């Protein structure tokens, strides 16, 4: 019989033999496992290149009954927070040797969420992380059938669902207490959209600090996370100052940095100095915030920790679907910059004269 010259494709066992390592070590290198020595990894990669080995993912799935693919259902990823969480999840999944299959939600409805889970199921994911920033989205997820392990991210901890969330209340408390420590007793808040769990937590933290200090709680200004809504709120701050309103602010805490940027722009236009006349703080720690004039005080969320905890929790559920429901809170960090400073009394002839008292009330009332 003539020799056709055909050769069988190289196997993982062939790679292990050439590299002088075990089959398990080759598998770890292929899954980018962190606990493989650099020299060993290099030998395995050289053997793979020499043999022209290509992993057979279908065969591996049949043997392990794992696709080594994690699904992510994401929404509002044009915003800094959701986009950063998605990036954190993808990094953490790759570190554990998993691929990520993402489905974006164009509308936040139970039907759309159900369809997203169905699609991930058809792709054979081992489990999924669902980003649920809205309260009604978390409730919808709790009602839907779950064909594989699911972990929520930024969905709060009110329902019996495993999840990871940044402690938004703690972050808001930290920045509000910081403003109080500087002598500010009239702190206004530009809130995010009411249906967002994050906006709710930040509003709660701000209000709780003022109430605990026995200070009046002014009505919050409504925003939608955009700089434009922050700008509109900033104009209201300046208008209140001109009217000599009884609770005119000396500080503004915006629920995200994009809205804080809008507030800063509006105050600059009105001739209000930051922080001499009004201190301004945000939330998120946008990279641009450090280069604002003045640099923005804010609250930094550890999105790397959110991704690591979310993926870790999901992998534990994949290994043991009967594991107890777990909730993890990631604590944020206050970042103090030049946009906040100790309160100064208005000076004659300064921009702070905008905040002079024309109503007869004492400046500290």
Image: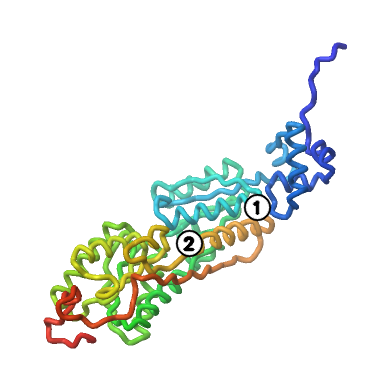
Work out whether residue 67 or residue 322 is closer to the camera in this orientation and state it: 67
Q: Residue sitting at 13 percent across and 75 percent down?
A: 243
**Outermost residue, front side:** 349
Q: Is residue 48 above or below residue 354?
A: above
Q: Residue sitting at 40 percent across and 68 percent down?
A: 298
Q: Residue sitting at 27 percent across and 79 percent down?
A: 186
Q: Which residue is mark 2?
A: 154
Which image quarter is the C terminus in?
bottom left
Quadrant position of residue 327 = bottom right
Q: Position of residue 162 (x, y in %)?
A: 56, 63
Count of all numbered marks drawn on residues in the image: 2
Work out whether residue 344 or residue 172 is closer to the camera in this orientation and state it: 344
Which image quarter is the N terminus in?
top right
Q: Residues within 10 Å of mark 2 (few under 14, many from 20)?
A: many
Inter-mark Cα distance, 2 to 1: 22 Å
Quadrant position of residue 244 = bottom left
**Residue 92 appears left or right of 203:** right
Q: Position of residue 119 (x, y in %)?
A: 52, 42
Which disc number belongs to residue 96? 1
Q: Are marks 2 and 1 in contact (CB under 8 Å)?
A: no
Which disc number belongs to residue 104? none
**Outermost residue, top side:** 2
Name the element at disc 2.
loop
**Residue 7 appears left or right of 68:** right
């Amino acid at each position: 019989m003539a020799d056709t010259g055909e050769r069988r494709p190289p196997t993982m066992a062939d790679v292990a033999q050439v590299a002088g390592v075990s089959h398990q070590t080759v598998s770890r290198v292929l899954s980018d496992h962190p606990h493989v020595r650099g020299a060993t990894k290099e030998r395995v990669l050289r053997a793979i290149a020499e043999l022209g080995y290509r992993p057979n993912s279908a065969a591996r799935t049949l043997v392990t009954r794992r696709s080594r693919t994690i699904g992510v259902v994401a929404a509002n990823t044009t915003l800094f927070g959701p986009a950063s969480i998605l990036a954190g999840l993808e990094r953490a999944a790759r570190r554990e040797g998993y691929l990520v299959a993402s489905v974006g939600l164009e509308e936040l409805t139970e039907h759309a969420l159900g369809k997203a889970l169905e699609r991930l199921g058809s792709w054979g994911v081992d489990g999924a992380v669902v980003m649920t920033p809205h309260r009604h989205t978390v409730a919808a997820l709790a009602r839907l059938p779950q064909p594989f392990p699911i972990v929520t991210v930024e969905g709060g901890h009110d329902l019996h669902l495993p999840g990871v969330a940044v402690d938004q209340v703690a972050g808001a408390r930290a920045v509000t207490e910081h403003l109080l420590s500087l002598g500010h007793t009239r702190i206004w808040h530009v809130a995010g959209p009411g249906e967002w769990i994050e906006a709710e937590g930040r509003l709660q933290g701000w209000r709780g600090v003022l109430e605990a200090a026995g200070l009046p709680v002014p009505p919050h200004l409504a925003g939608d996370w955009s700089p434009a809504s922050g700008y509109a709120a900033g104009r209201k701050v300046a208008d209140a100052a001109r009217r000599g309103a009884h609770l005119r602010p000396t500080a503004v805490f915006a629920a995200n940095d994009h809205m804080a940027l809008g507030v800063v722009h509006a105050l600059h236009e009105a001739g209000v100095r930051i922080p001499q006349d009004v201190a301004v703080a945000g939330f998120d720690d946008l990279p641009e915030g450090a280069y604002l004039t003045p640099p923005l005080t804010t609250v930094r969320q550890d999105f790397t920790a959110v991704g690591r905890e979310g993926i870790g929790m999901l992998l534990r559920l994949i290994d043991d679907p009967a594991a107890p429901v777990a909730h993890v809170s990631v604590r944020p960090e206050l970042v103090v910059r030049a946009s906040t400073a100790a309160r100064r009394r208005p000076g004659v002839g300064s921009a702070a004269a905008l905040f002079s008292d024309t109503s007869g009330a004492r400046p500290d009332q």
